[in-house]
Image: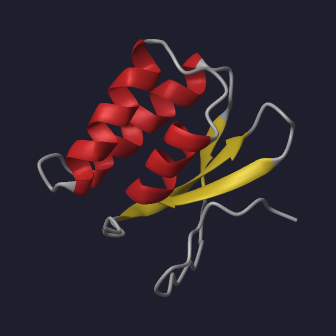
């Protein structure tokens, strides 16, 4: 079963350890990255972000709380984050906002 897209009010740009930037526009984007591409699969920030994102997808936690937890995990892993101003992401069915920037 595909989890619902729950967009963040303000997308997040993350500087990955490879040096590239990636945009995360929703709770699902963040959880998918945490579960499949995260460089360090331990730590308080990582665990809190995974749990909080799952709760947000179940609508038991606000999306903004999941975004804050994801930021904390990024900082714990040494990845800088910044808000994306004027980002117009229109995700269609099956699309994801966590594509590397060109």
Q: Nearer the viewer, residue 4 or 88?
A: 4
Q: From the image, which quarter does the C terminus lie in?
A: bottom right
Q: Is residue 51 above or below residue 75?
A: below
Tell me which corner region of the image, top left, top right, bottom left or bottom right, holds residue 51: top left
Measured from the top left, where is residue 56 in percent x and y? Answer: 24, 50
| Residue occupying image coordinates x 39% and y 61% | 8
Measured from the top left, where is residue 52 in percent x and y? Answer: 28, 37
Measured from the top left, where is residue 38 in percent x and y? Answer: 61, 33
63 sits to left or right of 33: left
61 sits to left or right of 42: left
Q: Is residue 12 above or below residue 71?
A: below
Tell me which corner region of the image, top left, top right, bottom left or bottom right, holds residue 37: top right
Q: Is residue 44 above or below residue 13?
A: above
Q: Nearer the viewer, residue 1 or 51?
A: 1
| Residue occupying image coordinates x 49% and y 87% | 92
Measured from the top left, where is residue 40 in percent x and y? Answer: 61, 20
Q: Residue furthest top?
A: 43
Tell me which corner region of the image, top left, top right, bottom left or bottom right, holds residue 47: top left
61 sits to left or right of 96: left
Q: Residue furthest left?
A: 60
Q: Is residue 14 above or below residue 28?
A: above
| Residue occupying image coordinates x 52% and y 38% | 34
Q: From the image, which quarter does the N terminus lie in?
A: bottom left
Tell me, what colour scheme is on the image? secondary structure
């Amino acid at each position: 079963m595909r989890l619902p897209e729950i967009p963040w009010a303000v997308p997040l740009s993350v500087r990955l350890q490879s040096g590239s930037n990636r945009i995360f526009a929703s709770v699902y984007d963040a959880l998918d990255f945490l579960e499949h591409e995260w460089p360090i699969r331990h730590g308080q920030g990582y665990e809190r972000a995974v749990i909080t994102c799952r709760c947000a997808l179940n609508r038991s936690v606000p999306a903004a709380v999941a975004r804050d937890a994801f930021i904390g995990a990024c900082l714990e892993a040494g990845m800088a984050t910044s808000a994306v101003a004027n980002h117009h992401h229109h995700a269609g069915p099956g699309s994801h906002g966590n594509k590397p920037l060109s």
